[in-house]
Amino acid sequence: MFNKILIANRGEIAIRIMRACRELGISTVAVYSEADKNALFAKYADEAVFIGPSPSSQSYLRIENIIKAAEETGAEAIHPGYGFLSENTHFASACRESGIVFIGPPPNAIDAMGSKITARQTMKAAGVPIVPGIEEGVSDPGDAEKMAESIGYPIILKPAAGGGGIGMKIVMSQEELLPALTSSQSVARSAFGDDTIYIEKYLTEPRHIEFQILADNRGKTIYVSDRECSIQRRHQKLIEESPSPVMTPDLRERMGSIAVKAARAIGYVSAGTVEFMYSRGDFYFLEMNTRLQVEHPITEMVTGVDLAKEQILIASGEDLGYSQEEMEIRGWAIECRINAEDPLNDFAPSPGKIKRYRSPGGPGIRVDSGVYTGYVIPPYYDSLISKLVAHGKDRREAIARMERALYEYIIVGVKTNVIFHKAVLRNARFRRGDINTQFIKEENIIEAVKDVAVEDDEKGKSLASALGADSRKIAAISAAVGSYLSQQKAGEKT
């Protein structure tokens, strides 16, 4: 077992991993940028090392700085979290060359899944079902037109080197193809340094379903559970749940077995996620994320498996501590990503100082967060405030607990997407589990968000009046969306 681990990440995921280390008796090292010198994760660690200026390109993405920090502090292993360098082959190789254990898959497995084209080719050769498309990359407009015609519209353009929905474009007709190709290439070139695009058939009304897998160094591989990730905006996940509302025991066994097959095809080790598109009874391989996912807590809640601990144990050379037969889903879990952003202004980021913060609690509630009252959310990174998770005996109870938790959540000083989550959970179609990746657009959720905002605003004004506040205080309280009634119940005043 390791004595000391460096976490090459920040925010709530850094704290999540440090907690797992603390339970295992392992010392932790944080690395932090100028913007994060007062961050909670840097204070939570046993040691903290400054690695550079605020921009991630000058700090969290500087491989040499992180390796140096590990060497200077005597860390035997590095956990990359997610994002930043977590799926960077060069980083995994640099760790190995420096005699430091990379807590994740081997570089060749990261490389195999790093390019969507290579991933498609690998999965096709392994007999894993893939979305109809062209395995070769394309950059010439003429070639793109021919490929699109052979597949049939609608199609989707995807940067070969990318992920997270960046640069993806849905194309419904030939007239839309060339402008979309130009745009997708431009984004891919800027984001990934590679403008290679590949083309897939676009599935109408698809669900985005993924499977958590675990694999040890001796080839034992299992699927842990499935997750529904269809509530998305611009291909970015916003709400996830486990299990998927569409899942049956037979479908889970079939999709899970394919996920295991995909992982074994690339010699995968550690925790990872195999993602599928599901449409009208059929499912197809989408991609594999060679890291821990943001939504991993819902899997932990329904299975009792600590995925962060398993990653560490596997990296230390231990055998996988579970069999496939032991994987049992108990109840239902939902995760809402609470971000500092304004859903009424196209989800624009809302960095700034948190003037008041109180997270919800009670039965079935888990909050993974790295913020506190007085903390300043920097503009340089992802705007995630917390991962709010609700677990219940079934989906109905999980939804009810999530609604109650959103009601209790107090975040004053920055705009948040709490009102967005309230609007989704109230939607009748969502409550039926009848969702797909176009849900937000089809249900016009933003209009529903406006209604929630007005409702919360009125509650804020009523509370302020009841407290005898003047007009200035009333306006201030009204701006603190979603916090009013919970503060009243707790006997607090803004």
Image (cartoon, rainbow, N blue to C red):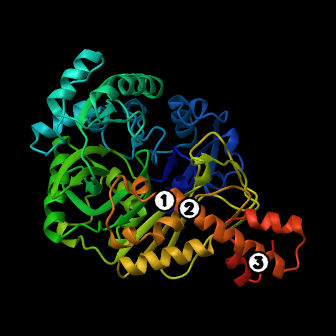
- Most extreme residue toward the right, as rendered? 470
Dots 1 and 2: beta carbons under 8 Å?
yes
Q: Where is residue 361 in the image (x, y as percent from the top left)?
A: 57, 77
**What residue did someone put label 2 on?**
449
Residue type, numbered disc 3: Ser
Query: How many residues crowd around disc 2 within 10 Å: few (fewer than 14), some, or many (20 or more)?
Result: many
Residue type, numbered disc 2: Val
Query: How many residues crowd around disc 1 within 10 Å: few (fewer than 14), some, or many (20 or more)?
Result: some
**What residue did someone put label 3 on?**
462
Dots 3 and 2: beta carbons under 8 Å?
no
Q: Is residue 18 visible?
A: no
Distance between mark 1 and mark 2 Cα atoms: 6 Å
Distance between mark 1 and mark 3 Cα atoms: 26 Å
Q: Which residue is drawn at 55% across and 81% down?
A: 362
Q: Of label 1 and label 3, which has the lower sequence position?
A: 1
Residue 386 sits in quarter: bottom right
Q: Is mark 3 on a helix, strand or loop?
A: helix
Q: Nearer the viewer, residue 180 or 187?
A: 180
Q: Which of 187 and 372 is in front in this view?
A: 187
* Left or right: 402 as drawn, with respect to 266: right
Residue 440 against residue 378 in the figure, above or below: below
